[in-house]
Amino acid sequence: MARFEDIHGRDESWAVRDTGAHSRTVRSMFARIARVYDFMNHLLSLNRDKAWRKRVAARLDHDAWEVLDLCAGTGDLALAAMAAGKGRVWVAADFCPEMLAGSRGKRGAESLQLAAADALALPFREIGVDAVTVGFGVRNFADVRRGVQEIARVLRPGGQILVLDFFRDDPAGEGEARGVSGPIRILLNAFVPLVGRLVGRDGSAYGYLSNSMAAFMTPREFIGLLEEHGFKDTFIERQTFGIAHLVGGRLDK
Ligand SMILES: C[S@@+](CC[C@H](N)C(=O)[O-])C[C@H]1O[C@@H](n2cnc3c(N)ncnc32)[C@H](O)[C@@H]1O
């Protein structure tokens, strides 16, 4: 099996492929907010984002060796899992180099292999990684189905997928699939773009957050998509009043 280190040496394979207008728009938006991304993340989530990433780390198999963190941004998910002692070889892939650059200087970042790569067209052969993690990335995919297909292609049989995101509220969702209550949703929809405009100086980027959530899947719909693509042992874990959900499963191929 090809090691990530081997692939990493082939520079030409890291070129970001163009997956269309939506991807270009998302990429340039993240390039614009890259410098304030971490600060705004902690502010807007009142630091809950750190606890959510720790839940991903806790769910990651102890024997997962090679882990691909897609939509890695400034590396916080991979770094949180590494700090928790999970994974040995970590590749942080993102199609926005400005976001990846934000990982520099963080504790443990020297052990991260950075890859400029589009999650919808991964520049990897069928390599069989032990786990794929995606934090707040899937919602941005131009084609979620294609993203799940790509993840299934690069995972080994039995490999884990762990997706943390802001899913669309599911009115019929119960238990772990429950979203936030109406008043909290109204508050979030007002608070996030306002703080984005005042502090992040980019109301449109933070308005995008609410719009992309409303247009995204519910946690149960996403689980259905995973199962269609051969994932089993799927689960949903509700985070902080249902603001975010951690969804995952294991490839059964
Ligand atoms: C909200 S940030 C999340 C960053 C990080 N995972 C975290 O937990 O903070 C979303 C990231 O996904 C990246 N992204 C969105 N769509 C992508 C795609 N198709 N391929 C690769 N990266 C993508 C963006 O560039 C951005 O860095």
Image (cartoon, grey):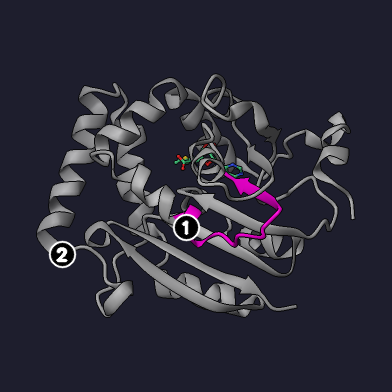
Between marks 1 and 2, how big is the CA–CA gap? Answer: 27 Å
Q: What residue is at 17 percent from the left and 40 percent from the top? A: 191
From the viewer's perspective, tell me whether residue 65 is left or right of residue 61.
right
> Which amino acid, mark 1?
Ala
| Callout 2 crowding tier (Cα within 10 Å): few <14, some 14–19, many ≥20 | few
Q: Is residue 35 magenta?
A: no
The image shows residue 207, relative to residue 225, as above or below, that is above
Between disc 1 and disc 2, the foreground one is 1
Q: Quadrant of the C terminus?
A: bottom right
Q: Position of residue 231 (x, y in %)?
A: 62, 76
Task: Determine the residue positioned at 46% across, 66% down.
Answer: 247
Residue 66 magenta: yes
Residue 54: percent from left, percent from top: 42, 50
For residue 247, which numbered disc appears in the image? none
Question: Residue under circle 2?
Answer: 181
Image: 244 above or below 13: below
Q: Position of residue 50 (x, y in %)?
A: 36, 42
Q: Which residues are magenta?
A: 56-71
| 2 with respect to 24 (left or right) | right
Q: Which residue is mark 1?
A: 58
Q: Is residue 128 rendered to the left or right of residue 174?
A: right
